[in-house]
Amino acid sequence: MAVTVNSPWTKTALWMAAAGLCVGLVLVTRPTSRSVALISDQGTPVAPDLKDPLEVRSLEVMSFDEQAVKMRAFKVESDGKSWKIPSASNYAADAQEGVAKATSAFTGLVRERFVSDNKADHAKFGLIDPTDETALSNGGKGTKVTFRDASGKPLVDVVIGKAVDASEPGAQAGARKRYIRESGKNRVYVTTIDGAFSTKFADWVETDLLKLTADKVKSLEIDRYSIDEKTGRIESPSTLKLSRNRKLASPMDPPGTPAAWTGWDLTAEPGPGGPGPDEVLDSERANMALNALSQLKIVGVQPKPANLVKSLSKAESSVALDMNDQLSLRRHGFFIAQQLGLVANEGTMSITQEDGVVYQLMLGELAGEADAAAAGGQVGGDTKADGKAADEKKTDARFVMVIASFDASVVPEPGKTAELVDLEAKEKSELPNVSEETRNKLEPLRKAYQDKVDERKKTLEAGRKRADELAARFATWYYLVDLKSLDQIRPVREQLVVKAAANNAPDANMPQVPGGLPLPMQVEPPK
């Protein structure tokens, strides 16, 4: 039987077939539930629990140094009052600002774009966990950053990878665009993150070794010698001393004007010392040494043995150093000598300040890469031609010991003026009936003298207190200092005493420049 197209039943069947086809298309083309899940957390915070920097009690950064073929790990932690570096024997960290900066880098950080959910892609994005010992390659490892609160709960635990590849489809590359994933999870996202997370000791501590004010330094003394390491005897000792004095205050100077230094004097043992008749002292070279000393930077620390700490901090009046103590000293370049006691294989330097504080720098051995790493410092080191770490090469870091003491004789006692001495003699001769005129003249002069005595007393008290604080600070540590070359801080006489230029020959009749130095500066030769 023929069926016409215009039949109502035919039209109904066609409409139903078309509707079924549309439903099928919707079912085929709509996103799968897995695709929705993959992008469902785009735009959400990476670290939703990180809200307040004050909640952070530890920050740990781990990265893999492909050149040295080793992991670099660094951690700072706080007890709520102060920050310490556990990997550096709990050395005090100046971490408050660094932690706050790191925290701000994660505050508001969002998962901007989903990239991959495949663990096999982690190497490509630089997101292999640096602590993963099962990884087949050392390449492709990222930087792991973990923040924890007081309870130990992770507030942030992520691996940060490479910068975003500009050639990747849909990529928005930029210096701050990085691949990132949560530790223990495969999913990779792109995020925009500020700041770097350093594993270098020097980036988390106060690096100024001496906290030295160059303008307060009164003298530098350089001791050189050779050590017979078998016998502990000192050979060929020599001492070079640079000292300077402030000019006398001028009545023409405004009140409160600081007195200027008049330049450097030089003595030496054995001689010769200062410049001869046709020589001058290069004060600029002396100033360079002083400036270099004031800028010495710590790049790492290692703890001293307990007995040595007790001895240097004067916690006990007499401390015997055992064999382990002496082995520790030797390994860092220090020895017990028969004549001088504690000495260093590269000599010593003394820096004396006007307030009586004396720094003694003991210059030890250059540190090896292993020592530098153990000390908390990431200070480089040589590598082989193939890029792999060399066997125990020396770095640019040197072991230095610092001992602080106090010398009251450095602060001169005030002298009485000739007028005061004469009036006191007159007062004595007039006893028991001292004239009113003598009393009236004596009173202001005595007060001015007593003010100077009191000022010296305050200076001594402050200097002694500072020396004690420095001694306690320095006693505990061998410092690694960025100081490969010693020439910059301890010049020899040939660098300090130079031939006078023909047109600048010293003239005994040359007047002093008011408020400054003689031109050229004249230094009396030793008699």
Image: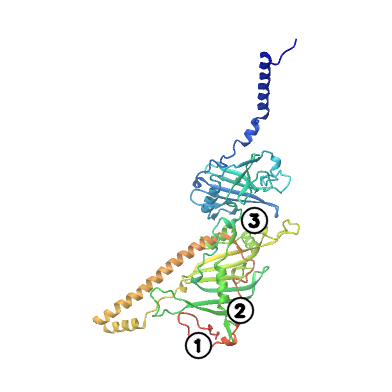
- Quadrant in the rendering for residue 148: top right
Say what secondary structure mark 1 lies in.
Answer: loop
| Residue 356, placed above or below residue 24 | below
Say what secondary structure mark 3 lies in.
Answer: helix
> Which numbered dot is residue 441?
none
Q: Callout 2: 10 Å neighbours few (<14), some, many (20+)?
A: some
Kind of residue sitting beneath label 3: Ala
Residue for badge 2? 493
Question: Is there a contact, CB below 8 Å, between mark 1 and mark 3?
Answer: no
| Residue 313, placed above or below residue 227 | above
Say what secondary structure mark 2 lies in.
Answer: helix
Question: Is there a contact, CB below 8 Å, between mark 2 and mark 3?
Answer: no
Q: Nearer the viewer, residue 112 or 222?
A: 112
Q: Callout 1: 10 Å neighbours few (<14), some, many (20+)?
A: few
Residue for badge 1? 510
Kind of residue sitting beneath label 2: Arg
Name the spot of residue 231 as percent of width and height, x first.
67, 69
Give the left or right position of residue 320, taking residue 261 as reference. right
Q: Nearer the viewer, residue 373 or 308?
A: 373
Q: Callout 3: 10 Å neighbours few (<14), some, many (20+)?
A: many
Give the left or right position of residue 404, taking residue 18 as reference. left
Q: Quadrant of the C terminus?
A: bottom right
| Residue 321, placed above or below residue 356 | above
Name which of mark 2 and mark 3 comes first in the sequence.
3
Q: CA distance from mark 2 to mark 3?
A: 37 Å
Question: Is there a contact, CB below 8 Å, between mark 1 and mark 2?
Answer: no
Residue for badge 3? 373
